[in-house]
Amino acid sequence: MLLSADYRIGVAGPFSIGLNEVQIGMPMHHAGIELARDRLRKSAFNRSVINAEMFDPEGAMAAGFLDKVVSVDELQNTALSVAAQLKKINMSAHKKTKLKVRKALLDTLDAAIEQDRQHML
């Protein structure tokens, strides 16, 4: 879910963020791999998907899981500020632009979801 959000705010602290599927014995599903490939930095992709490396919030931001890390005291004001900025966006233009920007990813995800579905049959 985190890799699907438009803007991701994390809180500084002793938290682990990452893709732990391989660590707990689950092969990563195709759709999750493609989301990770799209959102994570190239240097963090294999470490995250194949090695299940977990990151603290600052490391998660560097890897591409988060866009911003703030203190717990700053979280509400930061979220409201980001929401206010997003509220200024023309949603029709936003939707059309987002679909253009993410077309290749959406096509790839459609194929990945079909692959995942075939593996479940």
Image (spheres, rainbow, N blue to C red):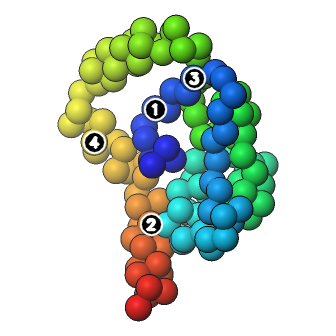
Within 10 angstroms of label 2, few (less than 14), some, or many (20 or more) residues?
some
Q: Looking at the picture, how far across and down is residue 24, in whole percent?
A: 66, 64
Q: Nearer the viewer, residue 102 or 75?
A: 75
Residue at numbered disc 1: 7
Q: Which residue is mark 2?
A: 109
| Residue that numbered label 4 is attached to | 95
Task: Give above or below for 18 relative to 30.
Answer: above
Q: Nearer the viewer, residue 103 or 11?
A: 11
Say which label, 2 or 4, has the lower sequence index.
4
- Mark 3 or mark 4: name the one nearer the start of the chain: 3
Q: Tell me if mark 4 has few (under 14), some (14-19) or many (20+) residues whose alpha carbon lies within 10 angstroms of its own.
A: few
Disc 2 from disc 4: Cα separation = 18 Å
Residue identified by numbered label 3: 11
Q: Establish if 105 lies above or below 58.
A: below
Disc 2 marks which amino acid? Leu
Tell me the element at label 4: helix
